[in-house]
Amino acid sequence: MGLKCGIVGLPNVGKSTLFNCLSNAKAQAANFPFCTIEPNIGVITVPDERLKVLEGIVNPQKVVPTIVEIVDIAGLVKGASKGEGLGNQFLGNIRETDAILHVLRCFDDPNVVHVDGNVNPVRDKETIDFELQLKDLETIEKRKQKIEKVAKIGLDKDAKKTFEIYQALIAHLEKGESARSAPLTEKDWELVADLWLLTAKPVMYVCNVDEGSVVNGNKYVDMVREKVKNENAEIIIIAAAIESDIAELESYEDRVAFLSDLGLTESGVSKLIKSAYQLLNLQTYFTAGVKEVRAWTIHKGMTAPQAAGVIHTDFEKGFIRAEVMQYIDFVTLGSEQACKEVGKLSIEGKEYVVQDGDIMHFRFNV
């Protein structure tokens, strides 16, 4: 599945440093605005300890983890919604992503200039929110004008309802609120899904802190927490400079020792990737054979045929059934044959909703 998270934030907040740690692509990281001109795209491997366990049991020829694309988008400035700086390009790049990782500078360092002269993560957040909200207002206003006459006549019920939703969204955005928090039903969102609103995308706030604040945060993180408490958004604390050091270490043992010295059990990058995966409402199922053990990304709630279609569209079209084992049963019993013998391999049809960690074989006919 082509899923993307976009890293956004004002210039010099640590976006490109974080991107370097996250992906195997390398964005230029330097102490001046607009260091990243074109959006850098990298591929993130989603950490999943279950793959290692399955590898030990199956001993396959290769192991393929699941991935999420990460996009490092050029820094934003005030006036971007009107085309200032790299505004139009920036906003267009966000539109192509599925979720937003909003990096906020939560550290003091006189050697790293701030585009507004001093550190204030709440102001930085509001700057980007404001530009995105303005762009969304522009999008809705244009669309509203197209259906206003039809909606007011009242003969087209869908047009009338859509017009009302447009008005509700405009009122919400004009209050300085993002579309994702608008009081709309799921059915309402279906009617206006083609707007592709920037502020309707799920968001995670990434507080980039100094080394001393990586465990408990600091006053800047507290400011962010207070500001976003009603947004139903996740906050993660990360020290991009530390993550950069960790990324340079060659062995797993060295990385564990480094983290232990800092009082951490897991790197910030690992936590961020897992959280981003959750933010996109994704889960994983596995295929496991001697040729390959592989993790597959699906949306939560997908049925067996839809999950099969992620491997190949023919699998979904010709779906007959799925043979399913739960991860815990497979690991406990140690083989597919053992699962069959004790009735832990089930035969599922088209209505089966895939669960996270399912190990699956698909039968299909094309």
Image (cartoon, rainbow, N blue to C red):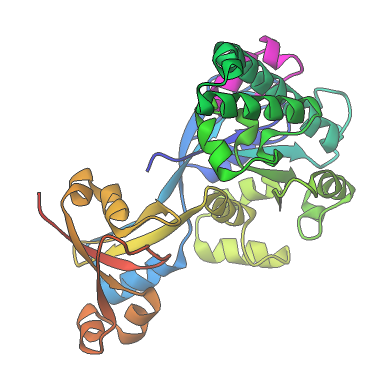
Against 227, is 34 above or below? above
Residue 218 appears left or right of 102: right
Q: Nearer the viewer, residue 222 or 345?
A: 345
Residue positioned 54% across, 25% down in the render: 195
Is any atom of residue 247 visible in this view?
yes
Whether residue 321 is situated above or below residue 138 in the rendered picture: below
Q: Is 216 within the magenta?
A: no
Q: Is 57 above or below relative to 191?
A: below
Residue 88: percent from left, percent from top: 60, 14
Residue 260: x and y, percent? 67, 67
- Name the residue rendered at 55%, 12% in the picture: 146
Residue located 26% across and 83% down the image = 339
Residue 364 position, x and y percent, is: 14, 56
Q: How many marks?
A: 0
> Which image quarter is the N terminus in?
top left
Residue 191: % across, % down: 52, 32
**Which residue appears at 31% of the width and 68% of the height?**
359
Can residue 238 be seen?
Answer: no
For this orientation, the residue located farthest to the bottom is: 342
Q: Give left or right: position of 68 versus 366.
A: right
Q: What is the quadrant of residue 82 in the picture? A: top right
| Quarter of image, res 89 | top right
Is residue 78 or residue 351 the one in the foreground? Answer: 351
Q: Quadrant of residue 52?
A: bottom left
Q: Which residues are magenta?
A: 75-96
